[in-house]
């Protein structure tokens, strides 16, 4: 088999005032200027770390913004990391009021349609949320995707636990109602922050997505339904027999807020850190540091600072103090 191209992509969709929904981890609506700046800033540690450890990969940034509307700091970052900007409209947009939060998440499926046009049979694609850091090369991941067809991140939620309004048990009910048969095993909830696919798996999802999308949006208001992209991914993975949860070896959703902390010693060695609580804190500090120093030459220092700033594997007094001051400053700005 030919080596092919390994694509690594992330995205930012700017919501208008009319369509704006709530983003709890960023602490604002999708039309907020402050929220936009947060998402622009976290691109810097994302693309810096993913490029540093994946020099042969093709990096892509998807957005509905024209390139001339991107801030200069991002344009400089993309030149530095050889990242291509792809301006892409949001076609798979849910109906207004579909859910209270994360209304931009179905943009993933627009990205997959665009990537099917670009990819050759031996290519692979990783779509990753921008609040992630890459700590090691991902060559093994891409090799596994070429062999297995996919690498998905199983969040391992309890069967009846409501995840953004819908449990895995309810996902099973939607599957049976849509396809007229029960899933072969209880459905998994695959986190949308890390989706790795071979070209044929991308094509399969693009083929199966439209009928499921249409079915989902014709369900009665009181019926179980799929609120966001990861709910839908669980059904599509079962439909296409994409059940390789190998991404659990490569990524972990690390919660580091005062209400919930699931970080354990050893998590600092994960190849990819997903840091949803650190968008306005640890990732912001890393953005400032990278903008000051301009490169990533001292890896040991960077990861020492990344651990300190983001609370991996533990939160120290210095971070608690810094976070408190930053949070107060953000409230003042808001």
Image: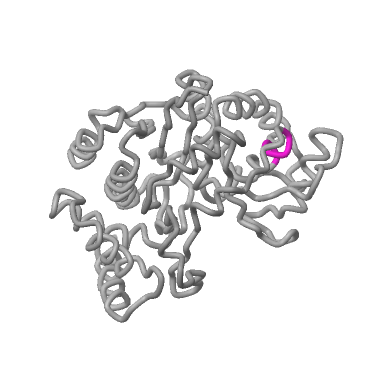
> Which quarter of the rendered picture does the C terminus lie within?
bottom left
Tell me which residue sits at (26%, 65%) in the image. Answer: 305
Residue 325 visible in rendering: yes
- The chief SS type of the magenta part is helix
Identify the image quadrant of residue 26: bottom left
Between 20 and 12, the residue placed more toward the observer is 12
Residue 271's place in the image compared with 145, above or below, is below
Tell me which residue sits at (65%, 26%) in the image. Answer: 210
Residue 179 location (% of width, % of height): 81, 33
- Is 170 covered by the magenta stretch? no
Start-end of magenta stretch: 235-239
Identify the image quadrant of residue 118: top left
Residue 233 location (% of width, % of height): 63, 40
Residue 121's place in the image compared with 85, above or below, is above
- Is 236 covered by the magenta stretch? yes
Residue 17 location (% of width, % of height): 41, 41
Tell me which residue sits at (33%, 78%) in the image. Answer: 316
């Amino acid at each position: 088999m030919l080596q092919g191209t390994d694509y690594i992509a992330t995205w930012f969709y700017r919501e208008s005032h009319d369509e704006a929904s709530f983003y709890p981890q960023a602490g604002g609506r999708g039309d907020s200027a402050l929220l936009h700046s947060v998402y622009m800033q976290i691109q810097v540690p994302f693309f810096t770390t993913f490029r540093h450890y994946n020099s042969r990969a093709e990096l892509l940034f998807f957005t509905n913004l024209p390139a001339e509307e991107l801030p200069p700091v991002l344009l400089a970052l993309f030149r530095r990391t050889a990242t291509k900007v792809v301006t892409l409209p949001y076609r798979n947009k849910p109906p207004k009021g579909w859910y209270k939060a994360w209304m931009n998440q179905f943009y993933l499926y627009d990205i997959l349609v665009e990537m099917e046009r670009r990819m050759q049979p031996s290519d692979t694609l990783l779509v990753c949320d921008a609040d992630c850091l890459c700590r090691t090369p991902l060559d093994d991941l891409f090799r596994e995707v070429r062999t297995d067809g996919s690498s998905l991140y199983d969040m391992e939620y309890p069967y009846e636990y409501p995840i953004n309004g819908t449990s895995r048990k309810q996902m099973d009910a939607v599957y049976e109602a849509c396809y007229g048969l029960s899933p072969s095993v209880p459905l998994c909830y695959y986190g949308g922050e890390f989706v790795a696919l071979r070209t044929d798996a991308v094509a399969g999802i693009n083929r199966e997505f439209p009928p499921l999308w249409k079915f989902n949006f014709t369900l009665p208001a009181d019926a179980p339904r799929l609120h966001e992209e990861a709910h839908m991914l669980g059904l599509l993975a079962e439909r296409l027999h994409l059940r390789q949860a190998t991404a659990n070896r490569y990524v972990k959703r690390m919660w580091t807020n005062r209400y919930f902390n699931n970080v354990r010693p050893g998590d600092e060695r994960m190849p990819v850190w997903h840091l949803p609580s650190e968008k306005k804190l640890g990732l912001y500090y890393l953005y400032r540091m990278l903008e000051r120093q301009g490169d990533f030459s001292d890896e040991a220092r960077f990861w020492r600072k990344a651990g300190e700033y983001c609370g991996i594997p533990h939160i120290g007094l210095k971070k608690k103090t810094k976070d408190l001051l930053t949070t107060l400053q953000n409230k003042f700005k808001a």
